[in-house]
Amino acid sequence: MKKLVFTALAVVAFSGAAMANTGEVKEDVVFSNENKVEAAVVQGPGDNEGTATPCQESAILLYESIINGGEDKPLLLSALMGLCML
Amino acid sequence: MKKFLLLFLFLVNVIQAQSGKVIYAIQVSPSANTVKAEQKVLMETLLQNANLQEFQLLFNSTSSSFKSIESMNTLSAYEAQINTIAKLAFSSADEIYFDKKAQTEYIKKDDGLIVKDDNLSLNWTITTNSKLIGSYLCYEGILKRTFINRKGETKTKEIIAWFAPQLPYSYGPKDFHGLPGLILELYEDKTVYSAKNIELIKDDQNIYFPKGRTISKEEYEKKLESSEAGVIIGKKREKEKNSQ
């Protein structure tokens, strides 16, 4: 009987610990992604509250000049921002 | 009589030719006044790069491929990135394969991903305008393409192609095809593609389609929307809509 109670407690404790860990990891991933996206969004021209580097701000401005009200090209913006990493 | 014989020989040559290769040069003429002073240098570098680009169209009776002709020089990481940006901005960074029988396009992206598009509908309007390009009499074809702008409005852009019925191959630069003749000149946005060399080959040359991970155009567009740049653009769209 004692053994059974001990086993049951151990199972509950381990599964609880495992669940807690999974939740924490998931939360971390979602949070860091959102932060990244938000940081990038406020980097647009005229959004001075952002944390954009001057290079990234310049990339977004040049992108706007190139498309000039035409069709958006996400790959072009991505490549222009990629210049800041070189 | 001599002229007739020459024309006959020329036509026989064209009719016999199954395949061909066209080299297109490009010319970009941007509206420079929209560029802020601090970005003029980078913009000029991009334009210089774009205006040096050349593209190759290969075709046979059933398919075609279109891609840029890469320089033999070794490029630094910065130069390679500038090259890619110039293509994305003014021409094409993709390799485009067209299966005429299946009316399907396979677009090989810079990262190796292949995007399949079988929803091709190019409704060209052929006008009576004509002009000579080299020795070929060309006619004008106009294609209207719609897109959604930042404000969420549907806009139309016009693509103008000059094609030669004397060259009865319904191919052209990028994903523009379907006219009753080879496209020798094409105007899209600020870019002009001009055929500078045409080689007709009697044998049916093979065109090898790319192999690898393939997704549909719809899937690819969703993937782009969820990328970092796609999210930035999405937020800008929302902002512009709300400010209306």
Image: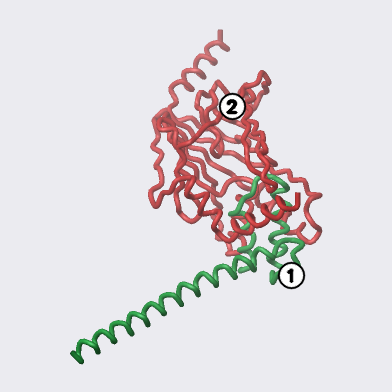
Q: Is residue B169 visible?
A: yes
Q: Chain of mark 1?
A: A
> Is residue B159 or residue B44 the one in the foreground?
B159
> Is residue B93 or residue A1 the one in the foreground?
A1
Residue corresponding to mark 1:
A49
Question: Pointer 1: residues within 10 angstroms few (<14), some, or many (20+)?
Answer: few
Residue B146 is situated, as x and y percent measured from the top left of the image, at 62, 37
Q: Colour of chain B?
A: red
- Amino acid at pointer 2: Trp
C-alpha separation, residue under disc 1 versus residue under disc 2? 47 Å
Q: Quadrant of residue A38?
A: bottom right
Residue B84 is situated, as x and y percent measured from the top left of the image, at 59, 55
Chain letter for the green part: A
Residue corresponding to mark 2:
B124
| Dot 1: element | loop
Residue A52 is situated, as x and y percent measured from the top left of the image, at 69, 69
Q: Is residue A79 visible?
A: no
Asked whether disc 1 touches disc 2, contact meaning CB atoms under 8 Å apart, the reply is: no
Question: Pointer 2: residues within 10 angstroms few (<14), some, or many (20+)?
Answer: some
Position of A72 relative to B7 (above/below): below
Position of A59 relative to B11 (above/below): below
